[in-house]
Image: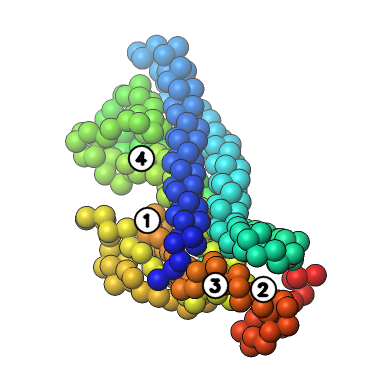
Amino acid sequence: MASKDYLRLCEEAQRKKLKLAKKQEQQIKQIYNDMYKNLSKKLKKVNSGTLTERYLQELQKELAKEIKSIHNKVEKIVKKNIYTSINLANNVQLDFFMQINEQHSLNMKDTFSSMFSKIPKAAMDEILYGTAYKDRKGLSERIWQYTKKFDKDIDYIISEGIANKKSTYEIAKDLEKYVNPNAAKDWDWKRVYPNSSKKVDYNAQRLARTAVNHAFQQAQKRSCEKNPYVEGIRWVSAGIHGRTCQLCKDRDGQLFKIKDVPLDHPNGLCTTIPDIPMSLEEIGTELRAWIDGASNLKLDKWFDEYGEDFL
């Protein structure tokens, strides 16, 4: 069982991560909502009876161009939030050592700062360039994948609209409905366009939530590796009725070795908590004694492995 002081640091980081995810969701939804508003304004200016097929083709080209711009904006937001998430996880370990340093006058503030200074970039690169994943796909490539899905949906709505003998104006209005992130897709929509995405921003939201969560996990693992008092990382399943998968249920409460902690699945809501059985007081006393010359094989090994980071 982790010490209460340490758990407080972990819980605060988790709360901030959830707040970040909610803010990000609104940021992305607003980007898509702006696209919808632009399209809606244009359609209000045209005469429904004189709308031509050529207008529809131009609209399709314009949407394809706009979605690329949107995804550049989404990528910029996600990158910024990934970095914030990484620092939330990394600062748990840094704040942990800073508290001990202050309470026990260890005079190691610069040492601890240096030790954790390289983690944010390393964790960021793992997500941006895909080295944390088996498929090795980075953030940009994943964004490009759902860009193609958007283009396919636009093609699909136009072709299916024509096949169902809809007028050009009706198809244009269906495109307007598709790009509206707040629009509910009724039964008729599902009948005519069963293979289109139900929410235009769904793939972007899913990718963004996953990236922020995985960035937190990667930074957590890397920072815990440099904390000799972390004995493992415990999996805490979300436990949401109807949403928690069997795999996450099986992992609930399991204590993983730091290097063996799996990444949560896309859109996952589970939590991982580093396990430190010793209290901050006990750790501070042990570190103080070691600095003063007492023998401690665990801390000697820690210094041998990460001593370069102390400099």
Give residue 224's quadrant in the image: bottom right
Query: In the rendered image, which residue does mark 2 sit on?
Result: 288
Q: Earlier in the sequence, mark 2 or mark 1?
A: 1
- Label 1, secondary structure: give it: loop
215 left or right, relative to 226:
left
Q: Amino acid at mark 2?
A: Arg
- From the viewer's perspective, tell me whether residue 118 is left or right of residue 271: right
Q: Amino acid at mark 1?
A: Leu
Query: Which residue: 40% across, 75% down?
Result: 255
Q: Residue at x 19, y 36 (%)?
A: 187
Q: Label 1 belongs to which residue?
A: 269
Distance from label 2 to label 1 (Cα)? 39 Å
Q: Which residue is mark 4?
A: 199
* Labels 4, 3: front one: 3
- Residue furthest left as drawn: 187
In the rendered structure, are the residues bearing label 2 and label 3 in contact, judged by CB atoms less than 8 Å apart?
no
Of badges 2 and 1, nearer the viewer stands 2
User: Which residue is depicted at the point 54% across and 37% down?
Assistant: 70
Query: Quick one: which residue is furthest to the right in this view?
Result: 311
Mark 1 or mark 3: whose residue is earlier in sequence: 1
In the picture, which quadrant includes the C terminus? bottom right
Disc 2 on helix, strand or loop? Answer: helix
Q: Between residues 191 and 228, which one lies in front from this camera angle?
A: 228
Numbered label attached to residue 282: 3
Residue 62 sits above or below residue 145 on the image: above
Q: Nearer the N terminus, badge 2 or badge 3?
A: 3
The percent coordinates of residue 249 (x first, y second) are: 28, 67
Residue shown at 61% from the left, 84% from the top: 298
What is the C-alpha distance between the residues marked 4 and 3? 52 Å
Nearer-N-terminus badge (4/3): 4
